[in-house]
């Protein structure tokens, strides 16, 4: 079986065009319409936030793009367009964004810096996608993440619009348009209470729709109807792994969790904040110019300033965001520090640390599920790692 897992391990260095030196690289998440969305999904954590939701001012957009490109001296510079539903900003907004990116790259090269590869990713619910969007995505080399929770009964249970309409058919139509128009895409699939015991089924369903890259995102919301239990999530991912392994899908179908765990197993930077020792590499820019450490922590404690008042570099390289990132490891409970799987998950996302321990630290709600999956899958990851290492020799 040929193994060709899709992780990229890089140790990157950053210099800001003559103003900042040897700083951490970062990607930028931009929310062009804030948390505004044409859907009203039950489990959406953005619905709990209340930042301004007007369309991002063109001058804020221009400045954010220019400063991100000038502040990163790396081979690749990433922009993640998120929401809410970012497509509500309209195609013209994104055409202008690409123009700003191209001009900023030209300026950077003229100043003697290497030409970076600009990577644009966008996350959408898929219901607004049409042929025009597909043409733009393909021609502008956007990687499109589309939210599909699985078969119709799972997808429609929590993903509805504001009048309660079920939108599975529109979402699948969006996926099929992307696929049939040769747009690079992946699927973000939440693991919620309706997914319980259906890991194999969901994985096979996504494969049947031509999905090659999958992210399975657990919904953590204790006490809510839509939240997954830790053990249910662990069993779900074990079942997905079984289906993936038994069908020899490695190298043909990619599951983000598998790539990330394998990278951590090989001691290679995994590229996913929740499983990294430090977070804070992807600050979020709201539509009104407000900057926060992370899109999961849009609150006063993690507010870095407004782009109309400070530079993006000042926010990203501030002591506040450095402390935010370091806290991920500094606040690990004892159970994590002595855990044999610590280097695989690094405590998971801080937002999910809600289980109070004997000291003042909190354990990740998904801990049992992670441990179940790691215990089961580790022998397989070791086999893959051994093969990768032997092929490098």
Image (tube, rainbow, N blue to C red):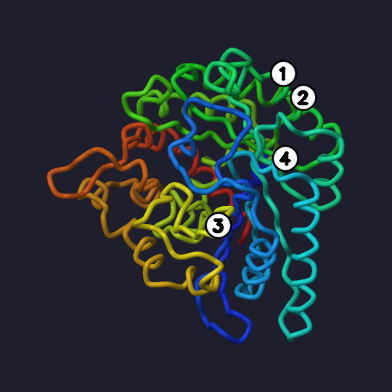
In this picture, is 300 found above or below 220?
A: below
Question: Is tag 4's residue or tag 3's residue first in the polypeptide sequence?
Answer: 4
User: Which of the two marks, 1 or 3, is nearer to us in this view?
Assistant: 3
- State the CA–CA distance, disc 2 to disc 3: 30 Å
**Element at label 2:** helix
- Residue with the mark numbered 1: 169
Q: Residue at x 80, y 75 (%)?
A: 106
Q: Which mark is residue 197?
A: none
The C terminus, quarter of image: bottom right
- State the CA–CA distance, disc 1 to disc 2: 6 Å
- Residue with the mark numbered 2: 173
Where does the image place residue 246, in percent across and percent down from the top left?
59, 26
Question: Is tag 2's residue or tag 3's residue first in the polypeptide sequence?
Answer: 2
In this picture, is 366 found above or below 303?
A: above
- Residue with the mark numbered 3: 285
Q: Residue at x 78, y 58 (%)?
A: 96
- Residue with the mark numbered 4: 185
Q: Are marks 1 and 4 in contact (CB under 8 Å)?
A: no
The N terminus, quarter of image: top right
Q: Residue at x 52, y 30 (%)?
A: 190
- State the CA–CA distance, disc 2 to disc 4: 14 Å
**Element at label 4:** strand
């Amino acid at each position: 079986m040929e193994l060709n897992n899709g992780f990229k391990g890089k140790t990157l260095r950053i210099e800001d065009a003559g103003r900042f030196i040897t700083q951490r690289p970062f990607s930028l998440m931009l929310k062009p319409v804030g948390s505004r969305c044409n859907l009203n999904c039950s489990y959406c954590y953005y619905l709990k936030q209340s930042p301004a939701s007007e369309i991002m001012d063109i001058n804020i957009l221009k400045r954010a793009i220019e400063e991100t490109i000038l502040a990163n001296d790396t081979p690749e510079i990433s922009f993640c367009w998120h929401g809410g539903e970012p497509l509500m900003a309209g195609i013209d907004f994104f055409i202008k964004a690409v123009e700003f990116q191209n001009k900023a790259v030209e300026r950077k090269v003229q100043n003697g810096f290497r030409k970076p590869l600009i990577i644009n990713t966008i996350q959408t619910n898929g219901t607004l996608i049409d042929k025009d969007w597909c043409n733009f995505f393909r021609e502008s080399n956007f990687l499109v993440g589309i939210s599909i929770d699985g078969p119709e009964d799972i997808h429609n249970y929590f993903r509805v619009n504001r009048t309660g309409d079920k939108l599975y058919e529109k979402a699948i139509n969006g996926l099929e348009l992307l696929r049939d128009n040769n747009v690079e895409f992946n699927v973000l699939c939440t693991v919620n209470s309706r997914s319980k015991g259906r890991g194999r089924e969901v994985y096979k369903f996504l494969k049947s729709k031509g999905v090659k890259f999958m992210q399975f995102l657990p919904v953590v919301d204790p006490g809510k109807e839509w939240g997954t239990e830790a053990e249910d999530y662990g069993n779900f991912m074990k079942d997905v792994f079984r289906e993936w392994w038994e069908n020899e899908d490695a190298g043909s179908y990619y599951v983000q969790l598998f790539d990330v765990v394998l990278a951590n197993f090989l001691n290679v930077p995994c590229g996913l904040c929740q499983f990294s020792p430090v977070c804070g590499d992807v600050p979020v820019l709201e539509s009104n110019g407000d900057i926060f450490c992370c899109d999961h922590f849009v609150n006063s404690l993690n507010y870095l300033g407004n782009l109309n008042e400070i530079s993006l570099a000042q926010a990203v390289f501030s002591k506040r965001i450095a402390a935010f990132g370091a806290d991920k490891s500094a606040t690990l409970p004892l159970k994590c520090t002595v855990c044999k799987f610590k280097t695989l998950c690094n405590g998971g996302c801080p937002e999910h640390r809600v289980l109070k321990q004997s000291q003042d630290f909190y354990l990740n709600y998904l801990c049992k599920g992670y441990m179940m999956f790691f215990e089961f899958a580790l022998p397989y990851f070791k086999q893959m790692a051994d093969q990768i290492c032997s092929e490098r020799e």
